[in-house]
Image (cartoon, rainbow, N blue to C red):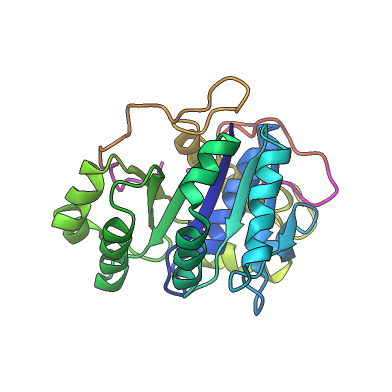
Amino acid sequence: MARIHLISGEKGGVGKSFTARVLAQYFIDQKMPFIGFDSDQSHSTFSRFYAEFAAPVKVENFESLDEILARAEQQPDQDIIVDLAAQTTKYLQAWIGESDLFAVLKAIDAQLYWWHVMDDGADSARLLQDLLVAFKGAPLQLVVVKNMGRAHNFSLFDASKISQAAQERKALFFTLPELSANLAQKIDFYNFSFWAAANNTKAMSTVERQRVKVWLQNCYTKFARFLKPLASSSEPSQPEKGLPETSQPDSSQSEQGQPAPSQIAANQPLQ
């Protein structure tokens, strides 16, 4: 069963592409095959860092979006990551409705994961509420990503009726740990994948490389709770469903064309 991951959030600046990048690196380092699509034609951030894995997709074009389903049907043993630009939900909803998407997914034996990446602002919470209303009862797995790199206090959201509604819908809650702003800026400046950032001895200091490894391993630990290799499990694990995760950061990615390590442990010796 293929898994299609729509990395969304609707508003700009919440870390959608950042989330897509760390998810891609997780699949690479865990030797889990995947296909990537990048809908952000103005920035193409996902494609810039993972060009070997990503192809462009135009969300306003049904035939372009259909390619996602074609790949899922042709390669059911692979995960598919779709990095969505801001303000694309209206196009997706039109495609989903006019294509009877969930009937198609059932026919090709694929599962849809909708990742809602958010900061701690009211806009992100309300956009999540809109999503819950739009897809009430739909057979999709909702993943709520609380991005600590874009916010520091999700207490109001955690106590809200919107969060409660997401829990009742059996959403998976994922807290994306913060990577220091200076380090994230340096990685972006050099166009490094996270694997490169953890291993490049010329541009990154020893402590910076180790900090990236620790952050990645914390992210990987969280991913592993519900993203098992498709060969061994096609269902998300149960413990986190409907349970809000703590906002405590607990947080390894591959340079294009270079072999990725199978695992980068937080306590790996400094290189």
Q: Is residue 126 left or right of residue 85?
A: left
Residue drawn 37% across the image and 62% down it:
118
- Which of the 4 image quadrants contains residue 242? top left
Nearer to the camera, 119 or 134: 134
As drawn, the residue found furthest toward the top would be 232
Stretch in magenta: 245-258
Q: Is residue 241 left or right of residue 224?
A: left
Can residue 30 be seen? Answer: yes
Q: Position of residue 219 (x, y in %)?
A: 50, 42
Left or right, 169 with reference to 43 = left
Q: Quick one: 150 or 125, which is closer to the camera?
A: 125
Residue at the (17%, 60%) spot, across then down: 156
The majority secondary structure of the magenta stretch comes to: loop
Q: In the rendered image, which quarter contains the C terminus?
A: top right
Residue 257, image x and y in percent? 85, 48
Q: Residue furthest bottom?
A: 42
Q: Is residue 178 left or right of residue 124?
A: right
Q: Residue 102, how many percent across, how many down?
A: 47, 46
148 drawn magenta: no
Q: Is residue 180 visible?
A: no
Work out whether 164 lies above or below 77: below
Question: Percent from the top left, x then y, of residue 240?
Answer: 33, 33
> Compared with residue 59, is residue 100 higher up or lower down, i.e. above or below?
above
Q: Nearer the viewer, residue 173 or 189?
A: 173
Q: Quadrant of residue 48?
A: bottom right
